[in-house]
Image (cartoon, coloured by chain):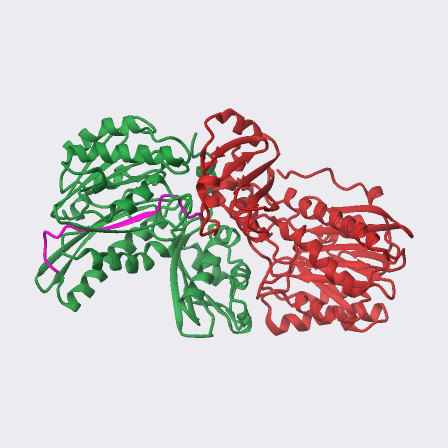
Chain colours: A red, B green
Amino acid sequence: MAVNLPPPDPQSLHRVPGVGLGVAMAGIKKPGRKDLLVVRLARGAAVAGVFTKNRFCAAPVLLARRHLANPVCALVVNTGNANAGTGKDGLKRALAVCKAVAEKVQAKPLQILPFSTGVIMEPLPVERIVAGVPAAIADLREDNWLAAAEAIMTTDTVPKAYSRKVRLSGGEAVITGIAKGSGMIHPDMATMLGFVAMDARVSRNNLQAMVKRVSDQSFNCITVDGDTSTNDSFILIASGVGVEASSEEDKKKLEQAVLDVSQRLAQAIIRDGEGATKFVTVTVERGRNEAECRKIAYAIAHSPLVKTAFFASDPNLGRILCAIGYGGIGDLDTGKVDLYIDKVRVARCGGRDMRYREEQGVRAMKKPEFTVRAVLNRGKASATIWTCDFSYDYVKINAEYRS
Amino acid sequence: MAVNLPPPDPQSLHRVPGVGLGVAMAGIKKPGRKDLLVVRLARGAAVAGVFTKNRFCAAPVLLARRHLANPVCALVVNTGNANAGTGKDGLKRALAVCKAVAEKVQAKPLQILPFSTGVIMEPLPVERIVAGVPAAIADLREDNWLAAAEAIMTTDTVPKAYSRKVRLSGGEAVITGIAKGSGMIHPDMATMLGFVAMDARVSRNNLQAMVKRVSDQSFNCITVDGDTSTNDSFILIASGVGVEASSEEDKKKLEQAVLDVSQRLAQAIIRDGEGATKFVTVTVERGRNEAECRKIAYAIAHSPLVKTAFFASDPNLGRILCAIGYGGIGDLDTGKVDLYIDKVRVARCGGRDMRYREEQGVRAMKKPEFTVRAVLNRGKASATIWTCDFSYDYVKINAEYRS
């Protein structure tokens, strides 16, 4: 059902010197699948992250946020259990996992960042995870990105990974990232889980500033169902064993390349959205400021009525006007609003474009990918987000998730 | 699929002296169904209303809001076309309908309130409506409430009407109401369409204050899909031919009875929610103020993940904690939150209740009606809203709405 691109070619995923990855089958939820990932970082690597703003954020999120203040040696990720809504006991269990990894990599538990994803409000099976750690450590390799992408999947139907290089003045830098997620996707800081690593040398302060800017233009621009998860985390790693981005131009180039990788990962999550059959770009233009453009874009992208019309390739476009109308701009002059599907103008000055014919709308919406563009004509700001449609399969997947 | 109560018994719908209703088949969208309603009011009737806050509010909403300032003689309602997203031309067409009715009832067009519901952004077939007006006028009768409820249905599967009497010091007052709606339901002022009439004498000012208070506790407490419609209107009529509510006690009694009728109509909309198989009451207790309780209640009620879990009778209750977490209370102490399904406590102090067994949750959620109760333990306020689940049929109905 999904609107996936072909799965990533393992050959296309460049090694990031200074970043090793190992996976294991720990039998956390079901036996026989990779469900544990350990990422080992070179000494001196810089790590920065952004996390969910959900008040019920998971125990591992609380610990990872705290441990980021220390020199980070390793990350540990499990699927099958989110360790969220688990209170103080959840914190103990997450710390026990950090401890098990720390012992194996000669570090302190507070140098380990833990991540979990899966079902909420069930106790983390910490013994099984701890028992799986040695196998994951034994598997550590720099060319293991695809296995890592597979090990963090839950309802995802394809692994999500992307890699590229960027030429800086001192030489080439490598950037590779993985992500997971296909439901409970409306990141408020970052997606369910996203990890992007580069070998370039970047200070922790610069990296932290970069991760905020990049997430705002990538993982914070997507929505599947409007549910902001308890476990969203986006982590940026600079192993530091490669070139340094010293000039302003180099820094810009590097950030642009990191943004490229992050946007592709974020879009891959939407393409693999639960039950998705359409990949839809929603652009709101000529608003007063970016914030109001985003509000309107999310109102369109969250409307179940709009999303089911996407699914049906039904240009029932009044539903989009309706969503624009309740999107929260109190003084919106609807008489100035234009609406386009790809290049077809369907509404002009707040009403149906007299030249628009329904076949045009059907033709545009039948495509697996199209753009909805609302032009507010009240300013110079714009915003773009990515979303998917709402199909029978979304209901099926989520009604049957635990069975 | 719906969780409807039995359809209203025509005998149970009391006549409201001073309020006549007539319906006709105008062939607005499809031939052979009642799609036009005229409500004729006794001279001196007071009318008050609340309307959608959607900026793309429909042309008839704009006119009805304006015409409320005059002595209202009649209401005219069509289904099959919302006359929303239709710009200035839509206003002209709505006014033409008012004119046609005004001529027949010896009034001015600005004494007529127009209402429309149906598909958005298509021109109102004003000729067909005007042609149907004489038949609706010829049909005017005080015992026509069930036919009126049927004439305003769109995707509704049952007509929605409720009636009761209330004894005041000067005698008995009669209150009868009808409503329609089952999708695009997240009223911001009122539901899709709700009309409640009584014969009691109430001044227009008092009636306007009453309609605000009543809608806040009835039509503003429901959500099917979070989409605030372009056409929501809730109209309260006091024909004034009956008793007067003069004492403070009478006024309270009358308002309580009007609230009762309005809540039953609002709940009937949820019971008939598109694809609904469950009727769910969401109560949030011990918050700091009512506004924050409502925010959390709506976060729960809007979450597609929570709603699909309702559909599956799957006590995947972590999804509810997740929604509470992103519900917008920035300083929520999740460690104090308790969660109940009916009387079963599933979470305590922000984590799973150790005594909770999953069979209890399944048993409660398998019922067609149950209550989700979140206790925030940070204040004394509370709020209750009503919602339904999210099923395959919601997608089916909305993917196929226009075909």
Residue B257: percent from left, percent from top: 21, 59
Residue A119 position by quadrant: bottom right
Q: Between residues B184 and A107, which one lies in front from this camera angle?
A: B184
Q: Nearer the viewer, residue A145 or B359?
A: A145
Q: Tell me, yes or no, whether the highlighted magenta stretch contains residue B100.
A: no
Between B204 and B171, which is closer to the camera in this rendering? Answer: B204
Task: Look at 38% across and 62% down and name the residue there.
Answer: B384
Q: Is residue B125 above or below residue B149?
A: above
Please state, as top left, top right, bottom left or bottom right, where the N terminus of chain B lies in the image: top left
Q: Is B33 placed left or right of B174 in the picture?
A: right
- Check the image and name the residue furthest to the left: B170
Left or right, B281 with respect to A112, comes to left
The reply to whether residue B7 is in sight is no
> Is residue B238 within the magenta segment?
yes
Outermost residue, right direction?
Answer: A170
Q: Is residue B124 above or below residue A90?
A: above
Which span of residues is magenta-colored? B227-244
Rendered residue at 28%/39% (across/down): B152
Q: Quadrant of residue B9?
A: top left
- Where does the image place residue B351, in percent across and percent down from the top left? 56, 69
Q: Residue at x 23, y 28 (%)?
A: B132
Q: Main secondary structure of the magenta part?
A: loop
- Residue B80: percent from the left, percent from the top? 34, 33
Image quadrant occupied by the C terminus of chain B: top left
Question: Nearest the camera: A121 or B67?
Answer: B67
Left or right: B83 as drawn, with respect to A254 = left
The answer to whether residue A212 is visible is: yes
Q: Position of residue A49 (x, y in %)?
A: 72, 62
